Amino acid sequence: MPLHRIRDQGDDRAPGRGVHPRNRCAHHGDRGVRRDAIGARSRMPEGRPRAGLDPPVWPPRGRQRRRRGLRRHILKFVFPDNPIMIEATSKRIRVDDVELHVLTEGSGPSILVPTGGGIEFYRRTFSRRLLDAHTFVYVEMRGTGASTGSPEGATYATLADDLDAVREKLGLDRVVVMGHSNHGGIALEFGLRHPKHAAAVVSVASVPDFSRAMSVGIARWEAEASTSRKELLARHQAELGALDTSAMDPDELTLRRYLALHPLVWNDPTLDAGALWGGVPRGFAIYMQSVIRPEAERWSLVSSLGEITCPVLALCGRYDYVCPVELWAEAIDALPRGVLDIFDHSGHNPHYEESARFDAVLLAFLRALS
């Protein structure tokens, strides 16, 4: 499949690029102030996200954190004379010997969203339009965020089994599973291992073969990236190397290493991606060491794609060099019900860099399921 098959849509983002759609208002523009799930008050970005890493956003500690069952948080997006109230439901679900943290928000049919890098990044990058049509069920993988246990020894396959256990405990039957980046591997494994309960799989900026992802992506980067973008990558790496990391928290160091890959990840070289994380995700380092890196060396589902019977939508950024679109272009025809859509103005996060078209494509796909 040719790499340039998608129409040139131009920049279809709303005015005030970089402002999360939840913080926009027809009467008051981009002046949103939000309260996060634990009540911390913070000014949302105006025009572009603010620089640097925010303080970590942790769940409540002590008695409240240990208590099982349901917790409800009212998330306020406050504008003068026009408050917007969004309710998110947070709970722990026991799976084997661990408790997985689940946060639910939105309305409509459920979409399971696995994450090993925290929930906040996705809450800040997926648009409000999606939450108006669907319920997002964020599931933090074992040993990350507010989930207990450890990801050591876990694979995309076993994490897909964890996800199915959560589905069952929530009383859901057939669900859509949407995985971004490495979590796309979990979503595909869910479709393969749990066909009776997989309504569809959505692979966002992911690949069906992680064992080849970096080699293919870097080869294209070397061939086509401009001199200025290569210099920007070198500058980010030099700044990372100059940091005193001897006393740095491992999770923060892992996040900073990822942010230093910015030109390989984002099409917009000026975007301050650090602001989108909302703090340092707990367990990011051990998840990277125990799951992402080992699976990057060995995981491929290409030979089994023909066994995934549910619809699969692959949404890829043209300028994603960590999960290159070539790998889906080669493999999409192996899926009985596979669709590939390429975003020509995006890197590793088409749901943010081309949010309007991303939402339109995804919602049309989900409507067709019924």
Image (tube, rainbow, N blue to C red):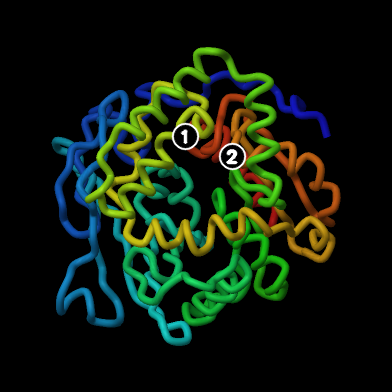
Q: Nearer the viewer, residue 367 or 111?
A: 111
Please identify the quadrant where the N terminus is shown.
top right
- Check disc 1 and report its element: helix, strand or loop: loop
Q: Mark 2 points at which residue?
A: 322
Residue appearing at x 51%, y 38% in the figure = 349
Q: Position of residue 308 (x, y in %)?
A: 77, 64
- Identity, as a three-letter code, of the amino acid under mark 2: Val
Contact, CB < 8 Å: mark 1 with mark 2?
yes
Please state which of residues 319 and 176 is positioned toward the viewer in this rendering. 319
Q: Residue at x 36, y 62 (%)?
A: 283
Q: Mark 1 points at which residue?
A: 261
Identified by mark 1, the residue type is Leu
**Is residue 278 depicted above or below 69 in this figure?**
above
Quadrant of the rendered structure where residue 312 is?
A: bottom right
Mark before the other along the chain sequence, 1 or 2: 1
Relative to 213, does residue 91 appear above or below in the rendering? below
Q: How far apart are marks 1 and 2 (CA)?
A: 9 Å
Q: Residue at horizontal 23%, vertical 64%? A: 59
User: Number of labelled discs?
Assistant: 2
Q: In which quarter of the image is residue 236?
A: top left
Q: In which quarter of the image is the C terminus?
A: bottom right
